Image (cartoon, rainbow, N blue to C red):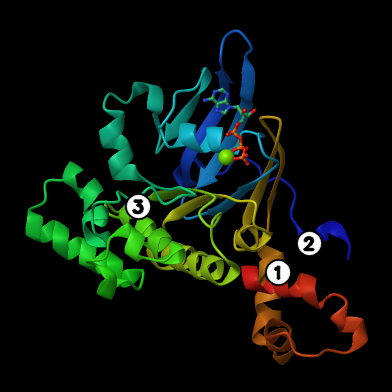
């Protein structure tokens, strides 16, 4: 199939649409043997966007995520969140806990706390009474389908369940942006699909902006925009165009689109392109 499937790089969006921007963002690690992990990255992230970041190991994906999540400081350049440069933010912990939720590859749950207590941890930053924290944690656990596991310790949960608790915890303070670094890295395909469905539902229903670093093509396929990193730089930044999206939605509603999504047996001419169409239809 020809290339026009994907739109070329978009121009900078309207300021009001931008939730996060990086300007010439650079991070050099070490002094004796400096490693330029991130090399002058300019990036805009729109409010409500689902963005996947892909690229080879060591290309700077986690470095970028840590910088945009204010877990690390750049060597030079700037991260601007909702119009505020992070270099001007006095209390980064406070800022982070109210704006950004993090999900890591290994869930990082505290082993001695129950699922519910783990979800409550970030809420200690907020002026909530214990009963309110508990109620909110229960609400979040119910949302990720784990209400009945509230009293389980992490080692009494499956890998997929632990990751869902980690997602509930990341949502504890209603962040406008979720940053996920290989959130399905340790999961099988069924659990991966569940996590992807949960994250995309959060985006659809609550408008949470999602930035997902992933090696997994199924996870990347759930994003409308995919940025590829190479050697600390953006190699490609591709979004699905609106027109293409409309056409795909039309196809998705048609009997043929439904047959492709179900994986039905199709005539040879169609069978060849069905896998590509299947992935595209899942993205709209
Ligand atoms: N704390 C650190 N000190 C020194 N070098 C580091 C540090 N963290 C990362 N690096 C180096 O910076 C580069 C980018 O690392 P980064 O973790 O961002 O890669 P990545 O794209 O997330 O890779 P992966 O897919 O393996 O997670 C790598 O060459 C890495 O060795
Ligand atoms: Mg990484």
Q: Quadrant of residue 284?
A: bottom right
Question: Which residue in the rendered view is the most extreme toward the front?
Answer: 155
Question: Which residue in the rendered view is the most extreme toward the top?
Answer: 32
Please indicate whether residue 182 sits to the left or right of residue 202 in the image.
Answer: right
- Give the residue at mark 1: 280
Callouts 3 and 2 close, C-beta under 8 Å: no
Query: What residue do we see at 56% from left, 19% from top?
Result: 29
Query: What residue do we see at 85% from left, 58% from top?
Result: 3
Q: CA distance from mark 1 to mark 3?
A: 29 Å
Q: CA distance from mark 2 to mark 1?
A: 9 Å
Ligand 1 is within 8 Å of the C-beta of the residue at disc 2 = no
Q: Is residue 232 visible?
A: yes
Callouts 2 and 1 close, C-beta under 8 Å: yes
User: Mark 1, residues whose alpha carbon is within 10 Å: few (<14), some, or many (≥20)?
Assistant: many
Query: What residue do we see at 67% from left, 39% from top?
Result: 57
Residue 227 rendering spot, x and y as whole percentages:
66, 45
- Give the residue at mark 3: 170
Q: Is residue 284 visible?
A: no
Q: Nearer the viewer, residue 172 or 224?
A: 172
Looking at the image, is mark 2 or mark 1 earlier in the sequence? 2
Q: Nearer the viewer, mark 1 or mark 3?
A: 3
Quadrant where the N terminus is found in the figure = bottom right
User: In the structure shown, which secondary structural element does the residue marked by tag 1 occupy?
Assistant: helix
Q: Nearer the viewer, mark 3 or mark 2?
A: 3
- Give the residue at mark 2: 5
């Amino acid at each position: 199939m020809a290339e026009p499937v994907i739109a070329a790089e978009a121009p900078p969006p309207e300021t009001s649409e931008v939730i996060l921007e990086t300007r010439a963002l650079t991070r050099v690690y070490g002094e004796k043997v400096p490693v330029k992990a991130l090399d002058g990255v300019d990036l805009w992230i729109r409010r409500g966007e689902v963005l996947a970041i892909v690229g080879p190991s060591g290309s700077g994906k986690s470095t970028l995520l840590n910088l945009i999540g204010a877990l690390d400081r750049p060597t030079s350049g700037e991260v601007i969140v909702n119009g505020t440069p992070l270099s001007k933010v006095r209390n980064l912990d406070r800022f982070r806990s109210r704006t950004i939720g993090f999900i890591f590859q290994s869930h990082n749950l505290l082993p001695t706390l129950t699922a519910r207590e783990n979800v409550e941890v970030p809420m200690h930053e907020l002026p909530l009474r214990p009963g309110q924290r508990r109620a909110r944690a229960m609400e979040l656990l119910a949302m990720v389908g784990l209400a009945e596991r509230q009293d389980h310790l992490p080692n009494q949960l499956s890998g997929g369940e632990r990751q869902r608790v980690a997602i509930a915890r990341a949502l504890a303070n209603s962040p406008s942006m979720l940053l996920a670094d290989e959130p399905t890295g340790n999961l099988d395909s069924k659990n991966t699909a569940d996590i992807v469905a949960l994250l995309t539902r959060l985006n659809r229903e609550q408008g949470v902006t999602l930035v997902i670093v992933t090696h997994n093509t199924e996870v990347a396929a759930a994003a409308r925009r995919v940025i590829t990193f190479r050697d600390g730089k953006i190699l490609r930044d591709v979004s699905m165009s609106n027109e293409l999206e409309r056409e795909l939605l039309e196809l998705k509603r048609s009997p043929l689109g439904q047959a492709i999504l179900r994986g039905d047996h199709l005539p040879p001419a169609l069978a060849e392109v069905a896998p590509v169409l299947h992935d595209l239809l899942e993205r709209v």
